[in-house]
Image (cartoon, grey):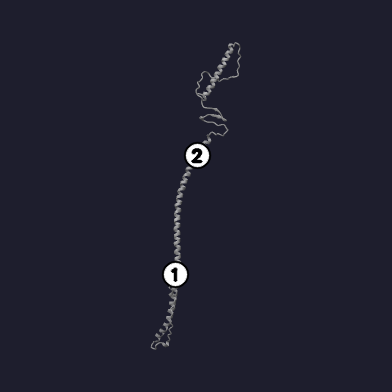
Amino acid sequence: MADNSLNEPVVLQAVGVMASSLPTAFSPAYRQYVLEQTSDATKVAQKANDAGGGAYDAQVRNDEQDIELADHASRLTAAEAELGNHETRITNAEENISALDGRVKSVESDVSALQTDVSALQSDVAAIQGDYVSTSDTAEQSLSGALDVAGYLSVDGTKVVGPQQTGWTAGAGTPNLAAFNADQTFAVSNPPTQAEVKAIADALTASCQRILALEQMARIHGLIA
């Protein structure tokens, strides 16, 4: 804090020194020295006052600088605290970024696995599209292997082939696969002639052979056993 006393001027009591008041015994040189001392004392007092004022001004300036430095110190302290807060936030952000980086790498790994799965599924879909039976397609379709049905086959909602019937005893003889006239008529006399009986017997044999052919066809196709 500035010393106010430094700003108070030094006041010299006026001392009038006249040459006539000096002892006559003083030599001229000494007399001149004494007279000059009065003037020098005044100059010294002025210099002291100037120095005191300068010292006071310097102390005032120092006080102002102390206040300014204190303000700077306070602002620096606040800035350091804010910087510390920023450093903490940056550290937290770096930790979060590191955690996110790990999660991103995990997601990238999952995406890579999914891409592999999708590629495999695309291959499977392509294979299925190239070899499948459609339930809505009206065009002709075919199977390279057997078709196993647990119930029965139907056409337009009508059952056409059901489960295999068992208990059939296989017929014997020669099947008739030749032309067959179901509308053939026979003339019968009274009494029947031998030729008429033979014709009817031959027709009955042909009918039995046709029945055997149908039985074998049903057996071959698994309809009966």
- Residue 52: horizontal and vertical position, in percent? 43, 75
Q: Give how far apart the Cα atoms at labels 1 and 2 are.
A: 84 Å
Q: Which residue type does callout 2 highlight?
A: Leu
Q: Judging from the image, what secondary structure is the residue with disc 2 in?
A: helix
Residue 135: image x %, image y %? 55, 34
Q: Which mark is residue 188?
A: none
Q: Which residue is mark 2?
A: 121
Q: Is residue 11 above or below residue 140?
A: below
Query: Is label 1 in a helix, a strand or a loop?
Result: helix
Q: Which residue is mark 1?
A: 63
Q: Position of residue 204 (x, y in %)?
A: 56, 16
Residue at 45% in and 53% down: 92
Task: Judge whether 23 appears above or below 135 on screen.
Answer: below
Q: Are marks 1 and 2 in contact (CB under 8 Å)?
A: no
Name the residue at 45% across, 63% down: 74
Residue lying at 44% horizontally and 69% vertically, measured from the top left: 63
